[in-house]
Image (cartoon, rainbow, N blue to C red):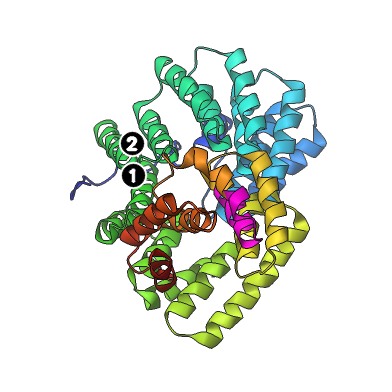
Amino acid sequence: MRNTRPAPYPDNRWNMKMRMVRWLLLSLAGAGVTLSGAEDPLENQLVHWAQRVDRDPVDWRASAILAGLYIKAGKERGDDACFEKAEAAAKQALERNPKAYDVLLGLAGALSAQHKFQAAAQAAERAIEVDPARPDAYGVRAASLMEYGNLEGASAVYAQFKAKGAHPFEWATHQANFAFAIGDSNKALKFLDKALDVADDQALPKDAYVWCFVRQAELLRMCGKYDEAQAELKRALEIRPDEFAGLVQRARLNLASGAAAQAVADALAIVARMPHPELLELLAEAHEASGQKEEAQAAWARAKEAYAEAAASDNAHDYRNLAHYLAGPGGNPEQAVAFARKDLELRRDAYAFDALAWALHKAGKSAEGAEGLRPFLDRLPEDPELFARAGQVLLAAGDREAGRKLLKRALDLHPRHPQRAELEALLK
């Protein structure tokens, strides 16, 4: 990572961090709609456009704008129901204008946010059929295929994305994500540096920098490079002090690096904004690391309640987190297996097979879990938690060489791993 970087240029409507709503920003610019500001807050806009759609359901542009506003609300509020409403509004717009390219991309974004990656890829394919010369839909389709776990298909579509003239910033950030998916964090970091070079050269808005800095921090944390990760987060939060993804990464980084008190402060601020179950779990872990037993118990109780609500709602967005929770603190490995299998129906990436393998391992079926992991062993993403889980599954399944190798790698990357003593005992 470079140690210095010019100050970003002022914001404009092109928010590079949220590619899936880029179509919305362009559409709203033409309609004269403001997305933020005290004079016209988001909630007022949602009400206004919902009423307009009710009055004139054949106005496809109004439905398209409403879909985009719901996507924005879902991203800002962490409310998954907004993405379902965005999907419905986009489909309503497409009933009137089935060849609206930007609306098809918006539909793909709403579907991706719900982890409906195959359907998202299909929506992007429809956009390509409408206008095969424009690059955006190729990037959306490739990203959807990658999230689903079809890396070979994603690679082929990414080649088309580049050939069609992808913006160099978007190309670099897409490639960073793809490099991480195939287990090459160093290459991912290099692509993020290329993206920042483009941001410098082309005077891109602040959001372009923030997204890259936060993503770099996440990868550096996973690689055990805590000081470098902290520097990237500092850059991101100097630009946007309330950037939610950056605050989450800072909490995780502080916890990993042993700054437990700071992790608690960050986690408290995070759950005050979005009390999602996995974030409440992060708060509980931070309290534990700080030696605050009563506070940790209270946070675990809140997490348990939140996970129970997530299980009852059967929201696809929660399947993977539910699988990990139920296999561990939740104490119900059989139910964890069920949720992991549901997640695997939606995406078949390394993390999906990891979740299933871990749940099966906890259910006493380590050999079955190990079989799902084996195809990924030479391209697992650089993640110490993933390595630790996979190593334990393989050891329990009788593959000591592969298991020990992964456990050693996990401890090298995360010297303060909370289960370090347990993992070291397995290596003896």
Q: Magenta segment range?
A: 354-369
Q: Secondary structure at mark 1?
A: helix
Q: Residue at x 60, y 66 (%)?
A: 328
Choose mark 1 or mark 2, whichever is in front: 1
Task: Sort mark 1 into few (<14), some (14-19) or many (20+) by Cα contacts within 10 Å.
Answer: many
Name which residue type carries label 2: Leu
Q: Residue at x 77, y 60 (%)?
A: 312
Structural distance between the alpha carbons of marks 1 and 2: 8 Å
- Label 2: which residue? 204
Q: Position of residue 81 (x, y in %)?
A: 70, 50
> What secondary structure is the magenta-colored segment mainly?
helix
* Quadrant in the picture for residue 266: bottom left
Q: Residue at x 59, y 51 (%)?
A: 367
Figure quadrant of the C terminus: bottom left
- Label 1: which residue? 209
Q: Position of residue 143 (x, y in %)?
A: 51, 32
Q: Position of residue 425 (x, y in %)?
A: 41, 70
Lower sequence index among marks 1 and 2: 2
Q: Secondary structure at mark 2?
A: loop
State left or right for residue 211 relative to residue 293: left
> Label 2 near label 1: C-beta < 8 Å?
yes
Q: Tell me, yes or no, whether the highlighted magenta stretch contains residue 362.
A: yes
